[in-house]
Image: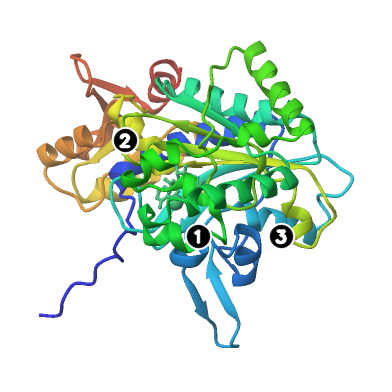
Amino acid sequence: MAKNIQSIRGMHDILPSQSASWQYLETTIRRLFNSYGYRELRTPIIEPSELFSRGIGEVTDIVEKEMYTFTDRNGDSLSMRPEGTASCVRAGIQHGLLHNQQQRIWYTGAMFRHERPQKGRYRQFYQAGVETYGVATPDIDAEVIALGARLWKQLGLKKIKLQLNTLGSDEARQQYREVLIDYFSAHYDQLDEDSQHRLHKNPLRILDTKNPHLEDIVAAAPNLMEYLDQESKQHFEGLCTRLESLEIDYEINPRLVRGIDYYNRTVFEWVTKELGAQGTICAGGRYDGLVKQLGGRATPACGFGIGLERLLLLMESQKIQTPALKPHIYLVLAGKEAQIAGVKLAETLRDTHANLSLQCNLAAGSLKAQIKRADKSGAEYAIILGGREIEENTVTIKALRYHAEQLTLSQHELNNFIQKNILT
Ligand code: ATP
Ligand code: MG
């Protein structure tokens, strides 16, 4: 027998039984983003590889190790997007959405990274994110953070902590870089291979290492806060003041540098202790240099990305119920005649009641089997249509979730019943 083909490791099917919580989450997010005046941007899943190497940074985990890159039939190097920000900037420049204006954009979709799959870490995963352009003041940093806080609240999630840091200006970071190179050079033999490789190319990234053996060395490293430029300091203080006024708790984490090169000034992560090593459910910050770096005119920018799988895992761990997808009515059709009349009745009911959800039993089955299916569908009511009902021009309605006598109703009475008992 031929071997069954399986999905690629780290890439998962989202099954019909899981889709209700996905849809609930996506609808909640979409509604919230729109309500703050953000508008959706959809970009292609595949982009020129150069967009990511220039945008995310050559010496990053994503570009060095994680991208799905291939040469297409024209010989062009293309990559599956590993994140959403670079594409938003590319599209923003291409369509003139950024210069001399304020933009609030959101996106959602699949991202691809060749990482070691584990709980909360996959090779295809979904993100939802916002990107804002044209606001240089910390008002927008505070707005995107408040947006995150409101989302956790709307979803009923608890114990998500905000960690905050500032990376300062490019110049301040440059100066700090030299200090870090000196510091880590003095501990060269204790560094792992990755960190040794990064020492001169991107020493800040050593602070972001996930290697527990380096914890002590990293903890004792010089602090970026001491090298901050005056303007970045003020920007950061401005953000902290706004968060305090909004009563959003935060913790300053001077080791927070983020895995992507484009960030400057504000960086933040929303973290939980409930998902082990994959505890960051949302990460973002300011990236004032990226638009220019990708060929546009200098434009201040700020945004975040949420990992949807991690958010769903957290909702599961906190036992948050999401509304199930279930029909109002399951239509049981007894006998051949009813199968034809039933489909007609179903369509008539859908014409009459715009918001009615009604699932029709196809492929016959005994009355008992059909009632069982009706029950399994989660429907509130079963409508039974058999030979007797067709003859009398009636239907029988059976409550599936509470005890009540079955009722025999005329078409007109059925419409009233639906209006009064089902659609209210
Ligand atoms: P991590 O440190 O966990 O690798 P990251 O810094 O690489 O995360 P970002 O690039 O900032 O993550 O992406 C934003 C969010 O997307 C993360 O906070 C996380 O919730 C989610 N995410 C990132 N990579 C994955 C993945 N491989 N699988 C599932 N979710 C992911
Ligand atoms: Mg990562």
Mark earlier in primary sequence (1, 3): 3
Is residue 337 visible in the rendered image? The answer is yes
Amino acid found under the numbered disc labelled 3: Arg
Q: CA distance from mark 2 to mark 1?
A: 28 Å
Q: Position of residue 159 (x, y in %)?
A: 40, 21
Q: Which residue is mark 2?
A: 275
Return the residue nearer the eye: 55 or 109: 55
Q: Is residue 247 above or below residue 59?
A: above
Quarter of the figure that contains the N terminus: bottom left
Q: Position of residue 279 (x, y in %)?
A: 38, 36
Q: Which tag is nearer the camera, tag 2 or tag 1? A: 1
Amino acid type of the residue that numbered disc 1 sits on in the rendered structure:
Arg
- Tally the marks: 3
Marks 1,3: beta carbons within 8 A = no
Residue 240, quarter of picture = top right
Q: Nearer the viewer, residue 373 or 79?
A: 79
Q: What's the mark number on residue 198?
A: 1
Disc 3 marks which residue? 90
